[in-house]
Image (cartoon, rainbow, N blue to C red):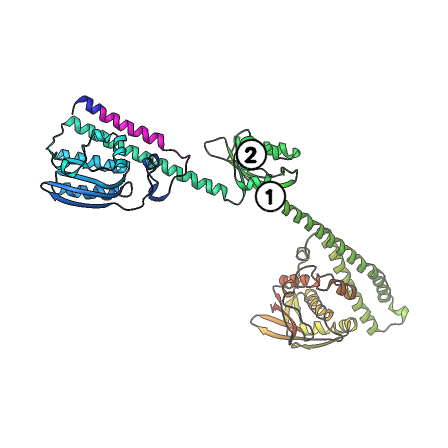
Amino acid sequence: MNRHTMIDILAGGDRATAVNNSRLNCTKPQPTDHNSLNLYSEAFKIPFMPDLLQITNTKKDDVDVVCLAGRLDTNTSVTANTRLNELIVSGSQRILLNLSNLDYISSSGLRVLLVTLRKLRKNRGDLKLACLKPMVKEIVHLAGFDRIFMLYGSEEEALSSFVRIELDEKETRIMDVIASTIAIEEDRRRTEESLCQSEKLYRAIFENTGTAMAIVDEDMTIFLVNEHFGKMVGYKKEELEEVKNLLSFVVRDDLGKVTEYHDLIGQNPADSPKHYEFRLKDREGKIKDIYMIQDIIPGTPRRVNSLIDITELRKIEEDLRHELTRKREFIVLASHELRTPLQPLIMFLQILTEDSGSFGMNEEALTMLKKCQQYVGREQEMVELVIKLSEMGGSPEEVLSQVQPNPRKISPEELIRSHITIIRYSSKLELAIDIPKELVITTDSEYFYMIFESLVFYLISRSPVPAKIAITYRANGKNAEFAITNPAVHIPPEIIPDVFTPFQVGNESKLLEKYGAIGMSLPVAKKMAELLGGTITIASDPGIGTTFILSLPEE
């Protein structure tokens, strides 16, 4: 092999590299099977064949004849290399590759041939190629391998051509350089294919994230958008990517805000705010409330923006504000209506109790009036609490939690019976109490009675007259459980979850007209029970009635 031949071999290797460089790009979709087709498959329009490589070998004189059928590519080159290497290790020095049934060879396959040839020539052997199909022969020619290998039209011609060849050191180095060049080229090709697949993956995520996405340049010119962004602003993707700037969709009053946040993220990505809201105007002039999430793409001046349409959410919030305002106005109106008749009643009771002798009242009547005065005062406190609640804009629980209980030892049976007269007079109630007289618990007496009053009133308001209510007791560990039952009341299952929700009064107009109910007694009662360390539960069945169970710690 002379100097010119060496140069031609290296030139052939460069020519193959040039073909690789001209064909490898990401502009056209690449197949995903078998780590993508080789560049030559695309160059010569060779159909993609997923068949595996079949290898058979026979011995003719001192030559191993190896027949390859199918495809010698990235997926099968390891198998071919292993089989050929086994022949060399077993002592074979002459190998003839019959390629009459080989449909395709890639750069990985060419490298296998070159490595095999180098091993054989180190052992004074040789490798010949015979019966190449036109497409395979053209690939070998484009790669410059027809200057390295002897190509024969028939197996007999190749067998008769074998002679012993001994490479000198310089030729061996050239063979090593060529083998290394092919290996590097193959690694580069695989890297580019991997990058292509990664780009496809991220584009798929970008398109199918479910959110409007836009990548913009430093001057906010749109570089890339997905279909969701196009639908949000009313333009096609092609129109947006060619001529539009993100600022053209921003409402004029919000231009300063959007520009400021865009500049800040470019100046200091780590500490700049990445979430903000602005108003967007679409192609038809409709204004939309947008929640923007932005970040800078590392190593570039470009920003990736995620836009979420929160127009409906803002409308719901506005409706909710109107609803809360309406309820507060209703509470204030109801509270003032309750407070107005209480004022003269409080004044008359005060006159009667402070000067009972002038009106000829005995001790029993005076005691009854003082009880009335006490309950009217409690009612006035509740009305003031409701007014305070409406002014604060908070829930009954928020206001009530500011009023801490004052626990002391009480007799539940005595406390409830001491109020029977007032309850019976105001509600036409038939009340049965089954609580041990000796039972004593430590709790706040005012809270305890107000809880009972709320639960009893709830059952009275939904019951025929007279309301028949039974109050029973049972011990449950360290807790005292009080059951308040009305067999004539049934609460539908779908209403039970809202019984302790503020402002839920069921048939609002009927109950408000008849009893002045505004849907706060049970939520307040439940919070009072919790402040006392207890709970309230409810059970309702058409055949049994409705039962509230108040569970309080005995200590």
**Residue with the most extreme left position:** 61
Mark 1 residue crowding within 10 angstroms, few (<14) / some (14–19) / many (20+): some
Q: Is residue 139 magenta?
A: no
Q: Does the magenta stretch include residue 25?
A: yes
Answer with mark 2 or mark 1, whichever residue precedes in sequence: 2
Nearer to the camera, 119 or 127: 127
Could you tell whether 86 is left or right of 498 in the image? left
Residue 380, picture quadrant? bottom right
Nearer to the camera, 340 or 411: 340
Q: Where is residue 326 in the image (x, y as percent from the top left)?
A: 74, 53
In the rendered image of this protein, does residue 35 appear above or below residue 17? below
Q: Distance between the residues labelled 2 and 1?
A: 21 Å
Q: What label does residue 239 carry, if any?
A: 2
Callout 1: SS:
strand
Q: Where is residue 396 in the image (x, y as percent from the top left)?
A: 68, 57
In the rendered image of this protein, does residue 249 appear above or below residue 507? above
Q: Where is residue 208 in the image (x, y as percent from the top left)?
A: 50, 44
**Quarter of the figure with the N terminus:** top left
Specify the segment rendered in magenta: 8-27
Which residue does the image show at 32% across and 30% down from the upper left? 19
Callout 2: SS:
helix
Which residue does the image show at 17% across and 35% down from the upper left? 128
Nearer the viewer's eye, disc 2 or disc 1? 2
In the rendered image of this protein, does residue 495 appear above or below residue 255? below
Q: According to the image, label 1 marks what residue?
A: 309
Query: Would you say the magenta stretch is mainly helix, strand or loop?
Result: helix
